[in-house]
Amino acid sequence: MKKNSYKSILLAVLLLGMMATVAIAQDGDKKDLMLSTSYFNSNNQTQYLVAHTKCKIDGKFLPIPAIEVSFYITNDSAESHLLGKAVTNDKGEAPLMIPASAQSEWVKSAKQTFVVVSKANKVFDQTKASTDVVKAKLKIDTTADKKINVMVLELKDTGWTPVKGVDLKVAIKRMGGDLNVGETQTYTTDSTGSISADFKRDSLPGDLNGNLTLIAKVEDNDTYGNLTVEELVPWGAKMEYVSRFDRRTLFARRGHSPIWLELLAYSIIGVVWIILVYLVGQIRKIKTLGIE
């Protein structure tokens, strides 16, 4: 009898040990982190990188925040090539301006490699990604008849050369997003590396002087990354600010709502009170009849 008890206890201990081992092994399995980086050149002046972190969770690719990443130029083996470090935000993105200290490495070649390395943690192993970028820029010109000419140039040896077959967009910067200057969504550069677009947004509100900001951009290009250039043009309608603070409008301050809205509200309140008074009167009549 005792032998059977000992065997049962020993079997239970073995089973618990196996379950604990499996649980530890499952906890020790780290997930695969998807890491990538993008290059941005704004107005041919400001250059920066953005690291992107994602992971497939429950069949969906979700951004991963709070991941520390390090950016390098050319390679990540030399500490002198470190551009800086950043931490991903709630969108899984970590931007970093390319510092002036990278100039000596930047001018060595017309093509550059940027490397981003994520720091290992309890959930993810260290991950590395790189992107190759050919130096390029955009040039924008406008004419009096509201034509927009944009040229894409890449650096070859020591000179800038026009590039054929590059897709780009030409739009107007607005608070809610960029608005295309016409019906064409994208333009492709010809043999001279240029495109021409017509401005067809007449009477579009501008600033106090009627100025609009044109923006030409190349997005997520495999060779050149993301390029943008802007120009201010006086093609908009002048915006004149008129204060409506003391006027009766739907969104005015208290006491300045429209007359029709106040009449409607007060009428509803009056009708409700009349019905309540009438019902109270009827209840009193019923009680009086019951007493009699």
Image (cartoon, rainbow, N blue to C red):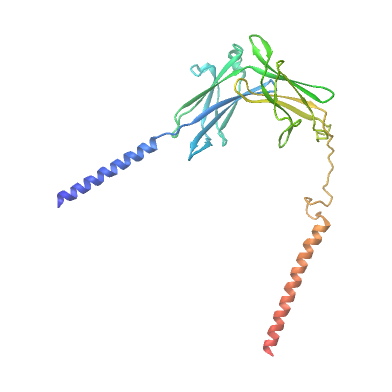
Residue lying at 48% horizontally and 28% vertically, measured from the top left: 119
The front one of 73 and 178 is: 178
**Number of marks:** 0
Looking at the image, is 32 positioned above or below residue 246? above
Q: Residue furthest top?
A: 158
Does residue 11 lie above or below 99 as drawn? below
Q: Find residue 230 and report its horizontal and vertical position in percent.
A: 73, 25
The x, y position of residue 240, in whole percent, is: 85, 38
Q: Which residue shows up at 33% across the image and 39% down it?
A: 22
How far from the left and from the top, in percent, is residue 62? 53, 37
* Residue 196 occupies quadrant: top right
- The residue drawn where x is 82% and y is 26% is 146
Quadrant of image for the C terminus: bottom right
- Side (left or right) of 257 relative to 88: right
In which image quadrant can residue 211 be found? top right
Left or right, 22 with respect to 145, comes to left
Residue 195 % position (x, y):
73, 21
Q: Quadrant of residue 107?
A: top right
Which is more toward the observer, 9 or 225? Answer: 225
Name the residue at 22% across, 45% down: 10
